[in-house]
Image (cartoon, rainbow, N blue to C red):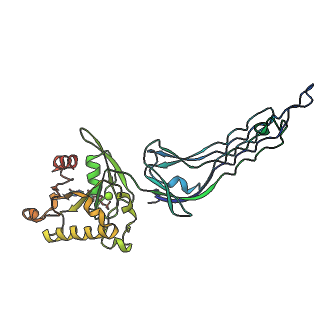
Amino acid sequence: MASFLDYMEIDIASGDGGDGSASFRREKFVPFGGPDGGDGGDGGNVIFFGTKDMKSLRDFENKRFFKAGNGQNGRSSKRFGKNGRDIIIKVPLGTEIFDLENESKLTDIIFDGEKVIILKGGKGGLGNTKFKSSTNRSPRKYTEGKKGNRKRISLNLKIISDISLVGFPNVGKSSIIRKITNSKAVTGNYVFTTLSPNLGVYKSENDNIVMADIPGLIEGAHLGKGLGHSFLKHIERSRYLIEVLDLSCNDINELKKQHKVFLNELIMYNKKLKDRIKLIILNKMDLCTFRNDIKKFVGAKGIPIITISCMKDTGIDKLKKAIETI
Ligand SMILES: Nc1nc2c(ncn2[C@@H]2O[C@H](COP(=O)(O)OP(=O)(O)OP(=O)(O)O)[C@@H](O)[C@H]2O)c(=O)[nH]1
Ligand SMILES: [Mg+2]
């Protein structure tokens, strides 16, 4: 889990605006040179940039303060101060940004290449050239640059996927995502093999469907057991959920119980998630000892049930069809 971080608090600051300049032309043979003070440059902005190349917020572990550059002061000969450099902070897609002072959501970075200015730099001040008028030909007046802003913010990554696989540990979620997408999710015959979400792309004829495989949930997760509920936030944005159940249990009653306990756990986190389940996969058919009873498992009204064996490669085409018609 060390490499996956989905929550961070950082400080950001935009740049100060540079001051306007109060200066007068001083040239030989021009005794009363007019005002020639240039404007100050604007302070740099703090900009967030979404990139598909980042998968977690781990980079922020080593750097927690980001400051844009200050604008330069204006100078004589109507020279403007340079604007301060913007600072561009890269974040993974699905990062929500909150103002920690009032817990308000500032933005949600969804698309690759999306740029959002979170803090604007201070405006540069005006040079005395700008204050020249018919009644005041030699103004000494100029304005100071506006100060930049500071904010303490939180970054909350919620991965974006079309479909998420959910179920207890060791039921074969990662094996399924490996089988039908380009994901290289690690599988293993023990619980909690998966400690951070895996994403994979399922390519159908007309569409690319992004699938997520999250760490397994166990009974009592809402009380903090196992990995708790912390990973469920990653399925909140999935349009659909696929529930995976394990047929290597003893009998149909155990299968029904597995389904019930799992649903209950999901509901404890968020009632609405239950209605997002659009398909149930019964996996490990090769280990099933009650094949004739399987049809007694009904799951939920109107939700298709597909029986597969990831190991023996059975039912995979049926599964793909079902996914394409969800
Ligand atoms: N016999 C059999 N074994 C399977 C099948 N599918 C997966 N397995 C095995 O079951 C074990 C668990 O599979 P995973 O894909 O790691 O399960 P998971 O649901 O991702 O587990 P967690 O990451 O712990 O939540 C692995 O040893 C797989 O090889 C199947 O259809 N039949
Ligand atoms: Mg797994």
Q: Is residue 193 above or below residue 226?
A: above
Q: Residue at x 82, y 40 (%)?
A: 22
Q: Identify the residue at the far front of this view.
A: 135
Quadrant containing the N terminus is bottom left
- Residue 169 visible within the image: no
Side (left or right) of 66 relative to 227 = right
- In screen coordinates, is 316 left or right of 38? left
Place of residue 199 in the rendered image (x, y in percent of width and height, measured from the top left): 35, 50
The x, y position of residue 254, in whole percent, is: 17, 71
User: x, y percentage for residue 293?
Assistant: 8, 65
Residue lying at the far top in this picture: please name it.
29
Q: At x 79% / y 41%, what residue is drawn?
A: 21
Q: Quadrant of ligand 2?
A: bottom left
Residue depicted at 9% across the width and 62% down the height = 295
Residue 284 lies in quadrant: bottom left
Say which quarter of the image contains residue 281.
bottom left
